[in-house]
Image (tube, rainbow, N blue to C red):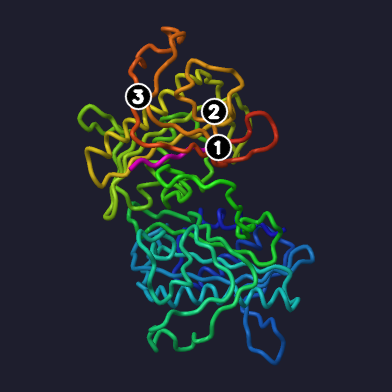
């Protein structure tokens, strides 16, 4: 199988930016050949026979399989110098047309695969324009709303322009797009040139007729067995910045490591970030602001014993234990975020925990534990008053004697983060709760 993701990661190290789409095309083709010396590469080849002049950006033949690769490269204005080479990117705009063209390429790839011209199609869209990949903060009511490809959106079926679309926009693009497959848009970071927001490049990769476990394919949505009361937070629509961070799939070494990595990712997304910001009597782990929102984030990282290799690095996580204390601290963070949100309208409070210790997300086996009020296992509802039971030891409650009062109700929903294998402690999960 052609591992395009690895090829892109390698390419980004020495070509983090391109002058134009043709530059991207040639560079990617060269990089594929470097990784797979025995493969055959053809650029701008006609793939549907003499009766139809349809050209493919890259045709790659590897181990008997034909891969049809279509590329898109859209930019906003950005000037920089990389390795003594000057780059001056144009502001291409016309995102509505750009979105249509991307999905049109997916339709073409489906047709190639169906016709047997290719065994698999791959669409790669690289851009430094946030309007393509950022999730909108409002209901989309634009003429291209059916073609939206921001992170987390799902695309399938027949896609049409909305009524009232201008003649200039429709010219040459009047035909609806019809897709046979279901696709989930999952954007990944490609490169970051400098601190400017426009220097951040992200890519979208969709695979046509790939195996079921390829990330661009999605299964039918699961049906909830129970309806959750509307006043309970279920956290099913995690914000883009959080999905972007977890999508990096980093193994977190410590709480400080988590704090710094999250801050770095937020900065790359255009936020102004402060660590350990003091607000009255509260100290906030990560405080982030941009033009549209202000975030107050508390982070926790708890580890179970693990020794492994990951991304070429030796990883040694220690067994931390002290679950009762850690559960108290998480619930205490919820209380802190409630106070911050209540005293500062407009601020979004968030509490994040990442761990590879399943004792946090699995229901407890012990009956009536001293920390029962602070349990955060999957499916549990945290609300009301949190207090230790009388038999809790002084060592456990030391500096944590304060009763916690929560005004909201929070359904605890653990989500997969990173799966290294089937061995003990090789599964990581996240618990992310928004407050307010």
286 or 236, which is in the foreground? Answer: 236
Q: Position of residue 69 (x, y in %)?
A: 62, 70
431 falls in the magenta region? yes
Most common SS among magenta residues: strand
Q: Position of residue 181 (x, y in %)?
A: 64, 68
- Which label sits on residue 429? 1
Name the residue located 53 percent from the left edge and 38 percent from the top edge.
414
Q: Is residue 74 left or right of residue 158?
A: left
User: Dot 2: few (<14), some (14–19), or many (≥20) neighbours within 10 Å?
Assistant: many
Q: Position of residue 257 (x, y in %)?
A: 44, 33
Q: Position of residue 117 (x, y in %)?
A: 73, 77
Tell me the CA gap for discs 3 and 1: 25 Å
Badge 1 or badge 2: first in the primary sequence: 2
Establish if 386 lies above or below 213.
above
- Which label sits on residue 404? 3
Establish if 99 lies above or below 175.
above
Q: Quadrant of residue 105?
A: bottom right
305 falls in the magenta region? no
CB atoms of marks 1 and 2 within 8 Å: yes
Q: Quadrant of residue 295?
A: top left
SS of the residue under disc 2: loop
Q: Which residues are magenta?
A: 429-436
Tell me the CA gap for discs 3 and 2: 19 Å
């Amino acid at each position: 199988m052609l591992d395009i993701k690895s090829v892109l990661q390698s390419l980004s190290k020495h070509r983090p930016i391109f002058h134009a789409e043709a530059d991207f095309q040639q560079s990617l083709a060269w990089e594929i050949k470097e990784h797979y010396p025995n493969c055959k590469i053809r650029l701008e080849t006609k793939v549907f026979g003499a009766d139809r002049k349809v050209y493919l950006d890259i045709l790659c033949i590897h181990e008997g399989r034909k891969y049809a690769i279509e590329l898109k490269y859209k930019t906003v204005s950005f000037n920089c110098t990389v390795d003594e080479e000057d780059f001056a990117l144009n502001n291409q705009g016309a995102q509505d047309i750009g979105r249509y063209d991307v999905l049109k390429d997916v339709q073409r790839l489906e047709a190639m695969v169906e016709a047997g011209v290719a065994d698999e199609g791959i669409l790669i869209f690289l851009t430094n324009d946030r309007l393509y990949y950022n999730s909108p903060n409002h209901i989309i009511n634009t003429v291209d709303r059916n073609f939206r490809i921001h992170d987390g959106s799902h695309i399938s079926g027949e896609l049409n322009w909305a009524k009232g679309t201008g003649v200039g926009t429709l010219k040459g693009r009047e035909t609806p797009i019809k897709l046979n497959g279901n696709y989930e848009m999952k954007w990944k970071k490609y490169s970051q040139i400098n601190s400017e927001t426009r220097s951040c490049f992200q890519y979208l990769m969709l695979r046509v007729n790939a195996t079921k476990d390829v990330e661009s394919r999605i299964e039918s949505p699961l049906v909830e067995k129970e309806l959750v009361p509307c006043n309970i937070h279920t956290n099913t629509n995690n914000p883009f910045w959080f999905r972007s961070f977890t999508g990096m799939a980093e193994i977190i070494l410590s709480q400080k490591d988590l704090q710094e990595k999250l801050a770095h990712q937020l900065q790359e997304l255009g936020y102004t970030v402060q660590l350990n910001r003091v607000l009255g009597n509260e100290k906030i782990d990560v405080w982030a602001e941009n033009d549209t929102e202000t975030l107050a984030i508390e982070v926790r990282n708890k580890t179970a014993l693990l020794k492994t290799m990951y991304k070429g690095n030796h990883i040694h996580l220690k067994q931390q234990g002290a679950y009762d204390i850690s559960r108290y601290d998480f619930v205490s963070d919820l209380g802190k975020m409630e106070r911050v949100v209540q005293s500062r309208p407009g601020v979004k409070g968030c509490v994040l925990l990442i761990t590879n210790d399943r004792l946090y997300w699995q229901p407890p086996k012990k009956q009536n534990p001293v920390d029962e009020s602070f349990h955060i296992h999957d499916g549990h509802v945290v609300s009301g008053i949190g207090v230790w039971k009388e038999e809790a030891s002084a060592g456990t409650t030391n500096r944590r004697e304060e009763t916690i009062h929560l005004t909201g109700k929070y359904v605890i929903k653990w989500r997969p983060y990173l799966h290294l294998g089937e061995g003990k402690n090789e599964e990581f999960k996240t618990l992310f709760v928004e407050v307010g």
